[in-house]
Every structure is written in structure tokens, then in C-alpha cells.
Image (cartoon, rainbow, N blue to C red):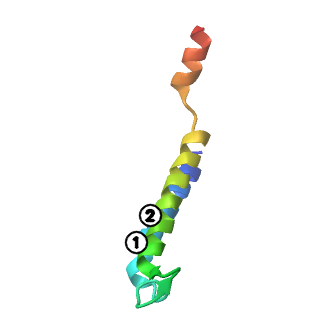
């Protein structure tokens, strides 16, 4: 299960790292009237938030089970 979480969290990181090496992003292009690097970074920022939310919601939390058992 941890490998799946690591892979999910690593995708946005790889997107950010790849930014300077992608010619369709790192150039004098406009996407939606904004520089392509800005839009690309914004998309990966949102993607990072989504990936971390997925990891958090699918992770096992042993302390939650202990709290519910105590009730």
C-alpha cells in the first residue's frame, strides 16, 4: 500500500522537475493568455493537492481505529 501512496505523491513532483526540460512548456508560449510555465505550475500545484488528498484518504490510520475501539 505504501508503494501506491509513494507513486501517487511522486507524479506531481516529477511534473515540476520536468518543467524546464519540456519545450512545449519552457518557451515563449501563451496558454489561456498566461505564460505556459505559469499555467503548467498552477496545474501541478492543484495536482499536488489532489494527490496528497488521495494519499490521506486512502492511508491506514491505526490511531483512528484505537480511538473508535475506546468508544
Secondary element under disc 2, as helix, strand or loop, is helix
Secondary element under disc 1, as helix, strand or loop, is helix
Rendered image: mark on residue 3: none
Of the 4 image quadrants, the one containing the N terminus is: top right
Crowding around mark 2 (Cα neighbors within 10 Å: few <14, some 14 to 19, many 20+) is: some
Q: Is residue 29 left or right of residue 3?
A: left
Do labels 1 and 2 touch, CB within 8 Å?
A: yes
Residue extending furthest toward the front: 33
Task: Name the residue carrying label 1.
Answer: 17
Q: Relative to residue 22, is residue 46 depicted above or below?
A: above
Seen at 50% across and 55% down, the residue is 9
Q: Picture coordinates of residue 21 (x, y %)?
A: 41, 83
Q: Picture coordinates of residue 40 (x, y %)?
A: 47, 74
Mark 1 vs mark 2, CA separation in Å: 6 Å
Seen at 55% across and 23% down, the residue is 64
Rendered image: mark on residue 13: 2
Amino acid at each position: 500500500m505504501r508503494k501506491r501512496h509513494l507513486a501517487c505523491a511522486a507524479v506531481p513532483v516529477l511534473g515540476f522537475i520536468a518543467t524546464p526540460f519540456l519545450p512545449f512548456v519552457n518557451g515563449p508560449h501563451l496558454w489561456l493568455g498566461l505564460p505556459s510555465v505559469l499555467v503548467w505550475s498552477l496545474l501541478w500545484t492543484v495536482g499536488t493537492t489532489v494527490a496528497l488528498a488521495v494519499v490521506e484518504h486512502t492511508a491506514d490510520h491505526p490511531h483512528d481505529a484505537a480511538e473508535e475501539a475506546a468508544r
